[in-house]
Amino acid sequence: MEKPDQVFWGTGMPPIRRLGIADLSASMALAASRGWNVEDRTWSLLLEIGEVYGVDDPTGGLAGTITMVRYNDAIATIGMMLVAAQRARQGLGLALFRHVVDQATDATLILYATGDGKRIYEKVGCLGVGQVPALIGRFRQDPDGLAEQTRPVVESDLDRIIQVDAAAFGAGRAPVLRRLFTLAERIRVVEADGRITGYAVASRDGSFAVIGPVVAPNIVAAQALIVGLATATDGLMRLDLHNQDLADWCRARGLWQVTSTTFMVRGNWPLAGDRDRLYAPASLAVG
């Protein structure tokens, strides 16, 4: 008998192809079928700035997807690894991941793994280097006046923000950030001696205001940026946080943890950047 990771169904693994904007509806349908609340603009962004691969299901729709966003030749982020329920445990997820590993060549891969995905990624040499809790809720009032330590962004700030981000992330990601900035509801910056030292972005994703990236010189600046965005946010907000102390601080101010992912790396680690300053990713798919 063939092993489950050697066969997709019946006659073996179907071809993996590059997806395009024509596959937007099918990608969203697959995500919805697995309980992922992913907006069309999120998929549209990934199709625009990244590489999206998938497998067609012979019964219709997509059987699986995976995305990759490249940052120069140094780093590539992997996300949206989805397999239809009726195709689970048949080797498709592993095949999709091996495919993007081949496409990435020498780039270091970074990703955020759930429990099921983590087992797949470990088979291809990924190592877990930290936990990233996801927090949702409404912030309580700002009695310490932290928000006043930040200010709204102006257009002339963007080049400096991109420089600050590259120093923390470990690779330049200007094209992706410029596209993210056009989708943002709000962006705030923090300064020291008249120079921007950190920034944070709030974007709408369905019923949530997602805060990320958050790049800051220290945890107090990160707190100020988050509060500065939260005080102008209606409804629930979500953060995925690399820093456990910051996560505890958010929990003490009204947010609650809904899940956690494992931050994983395949390739060079640690990266060139000062990732202690990267408190929250842009998203789990973008990094």
Image (cartoon, helix red, strand yellow):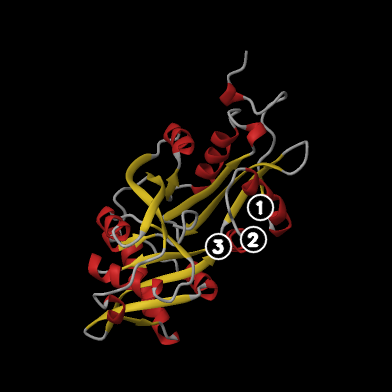
Q: Dot 3, how many residues are within 10 Å of its Cα: few (below 14), some (14-19), or many (20+)?
A: few
Q: Which residue is mark 1?
A: 28
Q: Which residue is mark 3?
A: 207
Residue 268, relative to residue 198: is it above or below? above
Q: Is the N terminus in the top left, top right, bottom left or bottom right quadrant?
A: top right
Q: How far across and down, in percent of the image, does residue 193 sit? A: 21, 84
Q: Dot 2, how many residues are within 10 Å of its Cα: few (below 14), some (14-19), or many (20+)?
A: some
- Gap in angstroms between the C-alphas marked 3 and 1: 16 Å
Identity, as a three-letter code, of the amino acid under mark 3 = Ser
Residue at point 54%, 72% (across, down): 183
Disc number for residue 164: none
Q: Earlier along the polypeptide chain: callout 3 or callout 1?
A: 1
Q: Check disc 2 and report its element: helix, strand or loop.
A: helix
Identity, as a three-letter code, of the amino acid under mark 1 = Met
Residue 80, relative to residue 219: is it above or below? above
Q: How far across and down, in percent of the image, does residue 232 sit? A: 43, 76
In-front residue for pair 85/180: 85
Q: Is residue 218 visible?
A: no
Q: Earlier along the polypeptide chain: callout 2 or callout 1?
A: 1
Question: Is residue 158 toward the left or the right of residue 20 in the image?
Answer: left
- Gap in angstroms between the C-alphas marked 2 and 3: 13 Å
Q: Is the C terminus in the top left, top right, bottom left or bottom right quadrant?
A: bottom left
Q: Which residue is mark 2?
A: 40
